[in-house]
């Protein structure tokens, strides 16, 4: 079965936005491939750190909504 990676990214971004707090802070998931792709596109802060959360950029918040 083939998956549409773009749709998966958009879904994850929408979920991160929906459950964000403090104007864009959201808990990280466990799929770092998707998180890395969202970071490369400028939608979230760098997920590769010791923090358990990421920050959505303004563009990420707008796109997620």
Image: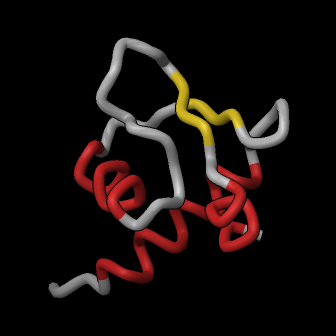
Q: Nearer the viewer, residue 26 or 58?
A: 58
Q: Is residue 64 left or right of residue 4?
A: right
Quarter that holds the N terminus: bottom left
Quarter that holds the C terminus: bottom right
Q: Is residue 41 left or right of residue 12?
A: left
Q: Residue at x 43, y 69 (%)?
A: 9
Q: Is residue 50 above or below residue 56?
A: above
Q: Is residue 43 above or below residue 29?
A: below
Q: Nearer the viewer, residue 45 or 16?
A: 45
Q: Is residue 19 above or below residue 2?
A: above
Percent of width and height locating residue 4: 31, 86
Q: Residue at x 53, y 59 (%)?
A: 43
Q: Residue at x 44, y 81 (%)?
A: 7
Percent of width and height locating residue 59: 66, 66
Percent of width and height locating residue 46: 39, 38
Q: Is residue 40 left or right of residue 2?
A: right
Q: Is residue 40 left or right of residue 17?
A: left
Residue with the most extreme top position: 50
Total numbered circles? 0
Percent of width and height locating residue 23: 83, 40
Colouring scheme, one of rainbow, by chain, secondary structure, one colour: secondary structure
Q: Quadrant of residue 50?
A: top left
Residue with the most extreme left position: 1
Q: Residue at x 63, y 52 (%)?
A: 57
């Amino acid at each position: 079965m083939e998956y549409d990676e773009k749709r998966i990214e958009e879904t994850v971004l929408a979920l991160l936005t929906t459950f964000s707090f403090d104007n864009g802070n959201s808990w990280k998931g466990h799929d770092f491939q998707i998180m890395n792709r969202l970071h490369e596109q400028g939608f979230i802060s760098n997920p590769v750190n010791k923090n358990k959360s990421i920050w959505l950029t303004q563009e990420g918040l707008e796109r997620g909504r």
